Image (cartoon, rainbow, N blue to C red):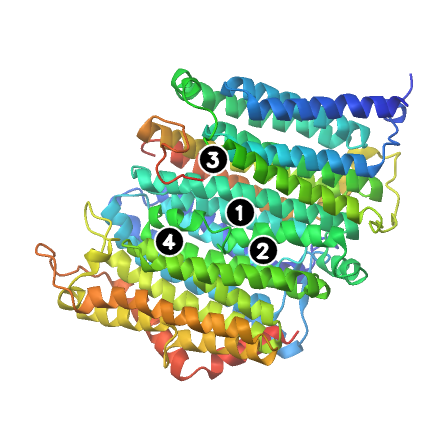
Amino acid sequence: MPDLAQLLAAEVPLSWYLILSVILFVIGAAGFLIRRNIITVFMCIELMLNAVNLSFIAFSHKLKMVDGHIYSFFVMVVAAAEAAVGLAIILTVFKNRETLEIDEVSSLKL
Amino acid sequence: MSQYYTATDHFVLLPAILLALFGCATLLFDFLIFPEAKQRRWLLVFLVLGEAFAGVAFWRQQSFLLEHGGNLTAFRGALVIDHYALFFHWLFLAATLITGLISYRYLEVRDEHHGEYYGLLMLAQTGMYFLASGTELVTLFVGLETMAITFYILVGFLRADRRSNEAALKYLILGSLSSGFLVYGFSVLYGISGSTRLSEIAAAVAARDAWDPVLVLAVGTAGAGLMFKIAAAPFHMWAPDAYEGAPTMITGYLATASKAASFALLLRLFVGPLGPARESWEPLLAAVAVLSMTIGNLAAVTQTNTKRLLAYSSISHAGYILLGLVAGSPTGIKGVLVYLLVYTFMTLGAFLVLTSLARQGMAGDDINDLRGLMKRAPGHALWMLVFMVSLAGIPPTAGFLGKFYIFWGLIETGHYTLAVIGAVYAVVAIYYYFRIVKAVFVEPEEAEAGPLTVSLGTRVGLAVTGALTLLVGVYPEPVLRLAQMSISR
Amino acid sequence: MTETVFFYCFAALAVAGAILTVTMRNAVHCAISLIASLGGVAGLYLMLHAEFLFAVQIVLYIGGIMVLFLFVIMLVNLEAAARERQFHRSWVGGLLCAGGTGAMLAWFWLRGAGTLRLPPAVQPTPREGGNVESLAMVLFRDYLVPFELASLLLLVAIVGGVMMAKKRI
């Protein structure tokens, strides 16, 4: 049985990955700007961080180094920590005022 | 000690280890050893003890550097101890110590937890340690996030207060967005240099044209992320809300230590590896600086909340400090360091006076709460005058010194327009700082307000910040020598 | 040929998931679309020989973070949240802003494509050891400091999460 990695041996040029990363990053940024539900806004940030990870790993593959993998690993750790604290704060806000709309949260006019 | 953890590594990392251990111990001791309300003050003693240990470690590093010269590099170039890093370490240490000392009464008044507060203060300082000493992108990023996440929690520390919750939420959302931009820029830097070490990135950047599109992309996105962290316009929109909602002492800590730590990273990147591309980022930074001064100074004029007013003033101060980086000459960079140091003391002092105004059921952050302070607490009122005069940049206080070096740097390098704009806005700033002074000295007292209760920590904090603000203004040589030493690498 | 087809499949999954995350009205649907997008990116990781990160993406991101999101969505009042307006009144402006940013990024990449000389690969990653082994070597040798610092970061997050979400500690 052939090795899966060999079967998929990537000949796709680096620039495709970079452009895909830009597309995902921009979709995330757009969602950040247009959504009003705070949890969805948070998901859009995860989307952006994910796009960054993709660009790190694409570079890393081209450079034949694993440093980029390690960077994305740490970005994931940070994203997890941010999500934990962020969702806890969202719960506190919700407990205190029963809404998740950004505009209703008075000071949160983005 | 193995080849992966040498004696040098240990010597360099020791202060961070001490801070992290004391921070964790404070979290544990809070409920294990000091569960009673009366024993809380021991936690504060513990914070002071931790800072003292870290201070001894920094002092040993400094004397080593003075004796042997050069820098201490550790962990294969991930961390460095040089005079530049030590300058910031001393600044963080002083800010954390003062913040801790004056928070005790505020936490009592607001009926909040002590253990978590002091523990998180020290853990935030640990994150800052890696921001000032890190010379590798992963370390810098994780250090930055450690500091930032601690600040999200500290800003929302008053859980029962809706303003505090919302401030934390807004700060966290925009902070995460800025991290996304920052780390995108870092990914491009990694791509073009094939390394996360700043020294190798420097070589890769120097080999490229300053207007190389990919390089501009990296500088632009990473720079946008950093501008968020230092609250420079147009990335400042989190600052007024976060400053207003946070507990008053944390506002002071956020405005000084967090901003200084982000500037430490900014200078390390822009003077170091990104220095050769100066041609492309200098106009951008100049635009950001002018915009920050405009928005900060003009918006501050109409504020009625003291914390919001100081938030806008801190945006304008970020603009001034950036001007020093735009000048880029040794005088300008020295001005940045001196400005950050004196800004720390005068801003902490101003927030300290505001903190002592907090009473049961009252935040004390409206400008009217300052009325008649002269009658209620003359000592506080006089120190407040010193801080406001210093923030406005009027001689002979320390605030003048920072502005002086920045303007000198600008004139030296031929940026006359920027110097004139900065000077004009300095005049605008005098107006709104003196609104506070007027409230303190001229306007009549509120009827029901009694004399202030002042704790020992507040007295010590006021004396230290006030005396330094005055002393650095009239006898600046030691600070100048320290700053000079930090930039001569 | 195979790899190009696979690239298009995974990229389409990632982009479609991302677009649905941004446009769906219901927060649960958004979360599920985001999981699809993350899965697509995970497939791309596999194509780029990042097997370890593929596993981390599935276990940590999809299994950990997204479940956390779903928990919070369930805890807050879903019915009321879904009835409210989901988009800003000025959503066109937001889209234009994001589109402008994207156009700028893309423009820089296209302009820079000619000068994007990557540095030569110094030492090829030893394939026989596998991705996880070479990653572990680098992680615990060159990136020891951030690794230890990350434990502190997670401690802060735990303390913060507990403190924020509980009424009295």
Residue C120: in sight, yes or no? yes
Residue B482 image point, x, y percent: 53, 77
Which residue bears the numbered disc 2? B130
Query: The C terminus of chain A is located in which quarter?
Result: top left
Q: Do labels 4 and 1 share a chain?
A: yes
Q: At 71% from the left edge and 62% from the top edge, which residue is drawn?
A: B277
Q: Do labels 2 and 4 share a chain?
A: yes
Which residue bears the numbered disc 3? A86
Q: Do labels 3 and 2 share a chain?
A: no
Q: How far apart are marks 2 and 4 (CA)?
A: 22 Å
- Circle nearer the viewer, 2 or 4: 4
State left or right for residue B415 relative to residue A72: left
- Amino acid bearing label 4: Thr
- Amino acid bearing label 3: Gly
Which residue bears the numbered disc 1? B146
Chain letter of disc 4 in the image:
B
- Assess whether mark 1 and mark 4 are in contact (beta carbons under 8 angstroms): no
Which residue bears the numbered disc 4? B251
Residue B124 image point, x, y percent: 48, 51
- Amino acid bearing label 1: Thr
Q: How far apart are marks 1 and 3 (CA)?
A: 14 Å
Q: Do labels 1 and 3 share a chain?
A: no
The tag earlier along the polypeptide, 1 or 2, is 2
Q: How crowded is mark 2: few (under 14 residues within 10 Å), some or many (20 or more)?
A: many
Secondary structure of the residue carrying tag 4 is helix
**Camera-side residue: C65 or C163?**
C65
Chain letter of disc 3 in the image:
A
**Camera-side residue: B200 or C156?**
B200
- Amino acid bearing label 2: Phe
